[in-house]
Amino acid sequence: MITIRHLRYFAALAQHRHFGRAADACAISQPALSLQIKDLEEQLGAQLVERDHRQLHLTSLGEAFADRAQQIVRSVDELMDLARASGPSLTGRLRIGMIPTVAPYLLPAVIRRLSERFPAVELRPREAVTGKLTEDLINGGLDVAVMALPTSQPALQEHPLFDEEFVLVRPLTDRHRPPPGAESLSAMRLLLLEEGHCFRDQALAFCKMSPGLSQDPMEGSSLATLVRMVGAGMGVTLIPEMAVKAETAAVEVDIARLAAPRPSRRIGLVWRRTNPLAEHFVALSEIIGQEHDALRDGRASGEEEGGRHP
């Protein structure tokens, strides 16, 4: 007999296209996942997965079966969420995602607060770029995510959390120069995050630069890498306010606020419109907003505009 467990494991395999990653997502061992998929194929009397040593492919039946399995799993999860929504407080599993330019600075405090406020919740945090979080929200792999708005996805509900300015990180030797405007900044060697990060796109938009850059910019996989590249004299970069204290404390760089209109972004909490836990997510947004305010106030006490961060 085909069970929900079979469908859940196969849906994870279809999403990740990798037995190891799918097993991790399901919190089981890879051999256990393989046995469940094999048992499902035996129940169906047909092959769903083409296996070789390098790649995993779904058969034509597997592709069609995956769509239906994901729909069923998502519907079952929403039934469970409907029962959870009837309670006075959050309980059970909560899969929460955050983009990489927020997670290192906000996620630890949020996890602590949520664990204190909702002791019956099993938190499963995940850090990923915007495209991956959006995909996982829509297909049911995540319950809620903290990301830049707007998502431009009709299936998702957005709840604004806070607005945040970008600041300029430049070599310490530039500390006496006035902050550049957007046009001047576009002529400098701007260090950017790799493609896929929404913060990269926001920085390019402020500088009115095309994503297909002609100046062969230096790229990094994290804000920490970019700041250290600036410290080595390789260019300038933009980072969000919440990252200033953590990323510049041990690097000799100058922090400057740009001239108005300053670049900024809006961060929000996002979930599927069909998720019955919406009221609980609004309460969750208040906690996240409070933790952001605490982080901002702690940084503001020691920061000066255009100040030096040795």
Image (cartoon, rainbow, N blue to C red):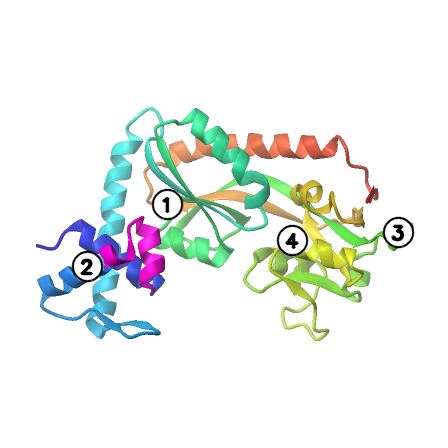
Q: Is residue 263 magenta?
A: no
Rendered image quadrant of residue 92: top left
Vertical placement of residue 139 versus 145, above or below = below
Q: Residue 292 at what x, y percent from top left?
A: 59, 35
In this view, the mark in front (1 or 4): 4
What residue is disc 1 on? 273
Residue to which mark 4 is pinned? 223
Discs 4/2, front: 2
Instruction: Using the rendered view, name the quadrant where residue 227 is placed.
Output: bottom right
Q: Quadrant of the C terminus?
A: top right
Using residue 172 as the reference point, say whether residue 13 is left or right of it: left
Q: Return the mark for residue 35.
A: 2
Q: Is residue 218 above or below residue 30?
A: below
* Mark seen at residue 188: none
Looking at the rendered structure, the kind of residue marked 3 is Pro
Residue 114 at x, y = what percent? 45, 31
> Which range is magenta?
18-33
Against 75, residue 11 (above or below) is below
**Mark found first going from the N terminus, 3 or 4:** 3
- Dot 3 corresponds to which residue? 178
Percent x, y of residue 291? 57, 32
In whole angstroms, how far apart are the C-alphas of marks 1 and 4? Answer: 32 Å
Magenta span contains residue 26: yes
Q: Amino acid at mark 4?
A: Leu
